[in-house]
Image (cartoon, coloured by chain):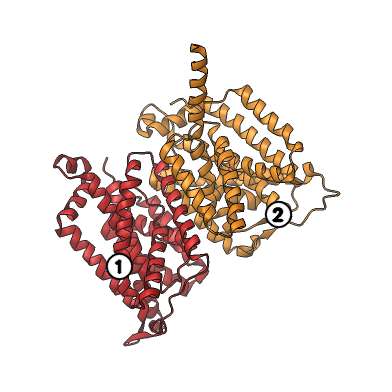
Amino acid sequence: MRPPALSRWPALAFFAAMAAAGPLMDSFWQSLLTLVFFYAYMGLSWNLMMSAGLLSLGHALFLGVGAYATAVLIATAGLDPWLSLAAGGFLAAMVGSALTWLGARFSVRGVHFALLTIAFAELFRVLFDNWELVGGTGGFFLKAINPETNRPLATLRGGTLFFYLAFLSATAGAYFIIGRLMASRWGYRWRGLHADEDAARALGVPALQSKVLVVAISAGLAGVGGGLFGLMQGSLFPDSVMGVRVSIDILIAPIIGGLGSLFGPIIGAFFVVPLMEFSNVLAQRIGFFGLNTLINGMLILAVITFLPDGLWPRLIALARFRSSAQCSK
Amino acid sequence: MTTLYLNVISGGILIGVIYALIALGLTIIFGVMRLVNFAHGEMVVIGMYAGYALWSATGLPPWTLAPVAALLLFAMGYLLQKAIINAFIDRPQHAQFILFIALALIITGLHLLFFGPDPRPIQIVESMQSYAIGPIRLDVMRTQAALMAIGLIGLLMLFLKYSTIGASIRAAADNLIGAQVIGIRVRRVYAVTAGIGIACAGAAGALIAPLFDAQPFLATDFTLIGFIIVIVGGLGSLMGALVGGVMIGVAEALAALTVSPALKTIFSYALLVLVLLLRPNGIFGEPERS
């Protein structure tokens, strides 16, 4: 299975254009697109695990561990924000490796592995709910910063433009890193495990190492994303960064966009996030609570029923059809 | 001291029987169609609202309304299977998962539109009363709900064992290709199975409505409790769902008493992790057929 990929230069041009457009947008569009790139980034991380056939229903665990570790290290230990962010990613990767090692060691596969990820995420959420050091259910808060004297690149906190560019560059970074990984021998091993684990093992794919590695990278990326997310929010609650709902929100964009394609999660986020935001606004305007949830559900149902491979492969197919039609003229 | 424990354990058993009914719905759908119904909790909440609406319309005791809720949800499940779910049976797991997420969102959205986010309590005199059996006091509402749940579970078991459709369901769960070979109409079996599974959720919802006030956001908790029970008991195993339900009910009640109410769910999740690692097919599950 060779996923349709956007080759390097168009992707680079896309990210550069988005970066250049940043300062031209007002803060509404900046914050909307910040959210789009946050979900695109988390979707890339989730999709990486899926590429090895590992369905994660607990990605919020990695996001949450990264978010809490980064915020606690900065606020309580006074560590440098960049180091804290790296430490958050590292811790998330460790948690992910431990989970996967346990799962692979006891040969937990398929649905059972997916349920194991939920179980771990919920276990951690309840533990964080009851952990005084991180504020329990009351939440963990970062001190407000003074926008006058703040240097965003030193504190990793800033206005909407700063976080827009931060999540945009994170997405671009993840896109190229994952692209390289998928073309490496590990990428082939992961795809092999996805296609048929027993056959891949028989061909000598080191299943345990491959799985632990892919989850470590995926969880590390999610942890860094979570760290940035926590710095943007300024407050963390176990339910809002580790809840089941967060894990579900993360995987909608890549599935809608198209599984297994590198650009899918990004397209999916561009489709899903504005839709959710606009239906939220609509529901509030006319006072029908639940309308937004209903609209989201119906659209996801429509996409999954009528576009089984997601939006991106369909767009590619349309583009190819157009260009071949032009050639034949 | 013993009296206290006896009371807590009996309370746990009563709620555990209702949990078992929830889990039974999940496990029967998985056993036949290999589908994991991630919208099961939402369907329990439909049952809660059905129970609430029927109670406010008729004023009958809530436990008597569970069979009506079960029939309503059976029809819903049957149609849902025919109209939507059927197309997903041979699709990959993640596609099925997204389907149920979409259904869960739609159901929650409809609940919010029709009933709003505020809890809808069923208030009747019996909710304050209890039966006394020696030193043990049994909450009237819980006891009635649990007895009704046991009755419904018994009926379902008899149906599966003795009716023709029940036998076809068991055959399809046991060996799908074999069932097709001997002429069982699998699509119909699927629709009936989905109906039964979702009816279990609905009946349990109607029974639990007087105990937990109906509210859209309870759904996730019910889905997770259902999963924990079904995994501990063994995905697809009916006996496992029953024993697992009572086990989790008692374990949560005891943990709330001896450790702290806030930490009671940790025990369920820890148990889930242990079972997943050590016996992925559950305590009563059979090893996966290859």
* Amino acid bearing label 2: Gly
Q: Which mark is residue B68?
A: 1
Color used for chain B?
Answer: red
Q: Secondary structure at mark 1?
A: helix
User: Could you say which is closer to the camera, residue A158 or residue A99?
Assistant: A158
Q: Residue at x 54, y 53 (%)?
A: A292
Verify CB contact (< 8 Å) between mark 2 and mark 1.
no
Residue carrying label 2 = A234
User: Could you say which is closer to the camera, residue A232 or residue B219?
Assistant: B219
Looking at the picture, how far across and down is residue B107, in whole percent? 44, 56
Looking at the picture, how far across and down is residue B160, in whole percent? 19, 58
As drawn, which residue projects farthest toward the right? A149
- Numbered disc in front, either 2 or 1: 1
User: Could you say which is closer to the camera, residue A257 or residue A169?
Assistant: A257
Q: How many marks?
A: 2
Which quarter shows the N terminus of chain A? top left
Color used for chain A?
Answer: orange
Q: Which mark is residue A32?
A: none
Q: Secondary structure at mark 2?
A: loop
